[in-house]
Image (tube, rainbow, N blue to C red):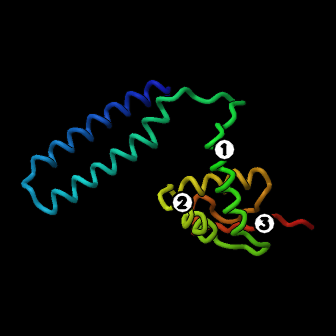
């Protein structure tokens, strides 16, 4: 799928979210309406910040470095994840829990992605189904 196709799909989704908000606003005032409106606003926020905005940026080149603040944050997250590791196998969810305590608003997928990057760099070992934090385990690399 081409980038322009993704952007077109994003536009369609944005229009659908706007229409959904209008339908919810048309409901009689009630706690249920307020709950639904909050849910629509959360979905819109996640859509805008985690999908639409990144897609609107030019794609990074193969050698594009991560910018200063982003790089510093990734290093902090990596350090937190690595600090939660030992030589013994631990569930990946437990290790991610340490990072979630530091950055509670960050999506779990980001921490899982950082674990994958660390594993690819040889900074930790993984076993199990790494598509699930509950069904995979991680540890510090065996130095023997």
Q: CA distance from mark 1 to mark 3?
A: 22 Å
Q: Which mark is residue 94?
A: none
* Quadrant (top left/top right/bottom left/bottom right) for the C terminus: bottom right
Q: CA distance from mark 2 to mark 1?
A: 15 Å
Q: Residues within 10 Å of mark 3 (few under 14, many from 20)?
A: many
The residue shown at (31%, 32%) is 12
Pointer 1: what residue?
71
Q: Is residue 105 above or below residue 14?
A: below
- Picture coordinates of residue 5, whole percent (x, y): 43, 27
The residue shown at (68%, 31%) is 64
Point out the frontmost of discs 1 and 3: 1
Pointer 3: what residue?
140
Dot 3: element: loop
Pointer 2: what residue?
103
Q: Residues within 10 Å of mark 2 (few under 14, many from 20)?
A: few
In the image, 40: left or right of 72? left
Furthest toward the left, the residue is 28
Tell me which numbered mark, 2 or 1, is placed earlier along the sequence: 1
Query: Quarter-wise, where is residue 84 in the image?
Result: bottom right
Tell me which numbered mark, 1 or 3, is placed earlier along the sequence: 1
Query: Quarter-wise, where is residue 136 in the image?
Result: bottom right
Dot 1: element: helix
The residue shown at (39%, 40%) is 48
The residue shown at (85%, 66%) is 142
Front residue (pair 34, 76): 76
Q: Is residue 101 above or below residue 88?
A: above
- Picture coordinates of residue 89, whole percent (x, y): 73, 73
Tell me which numbered mark, 2 or 3, is placed earlier along the sequence: 2
Q: Residues within 10 Å of mark 1 (few under 14, many from 20)?
A: few
Q: CA distance from mark 2 to mark 3?
A: 22 Å
């Amino acid at each position: 799928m081409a980038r322009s196709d993704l952007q077109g799909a994003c536009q369609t989704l944005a229009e659908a979210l706007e229409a959904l908000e209008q339908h919810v606003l048309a409901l009689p005032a009630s706690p249920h309406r307020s709950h639904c409106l909050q849910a629509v606003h959360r979905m819109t926020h996640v859509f805008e910040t985690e999908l639409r905005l990144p897609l609107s940026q030019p794609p990074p080149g193969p050698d594009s470095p991560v910018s200063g603040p982003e790089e510093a944050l990734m290093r902090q997250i990596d350090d937190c994840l690595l600090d939660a590791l030992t030589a013994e196998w631990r569930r990946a969810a437990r290790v991610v829990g340490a990072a979630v305590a530091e950055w509670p608003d960050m999506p779990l997928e980001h921490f899982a992605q950082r674990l994958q990057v660390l594993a690819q760099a040889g900074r930790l070992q993984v076993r199990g189904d790494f598509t699930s934090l509950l069904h995979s385990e991680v540890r510090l690399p065996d130095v023997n």
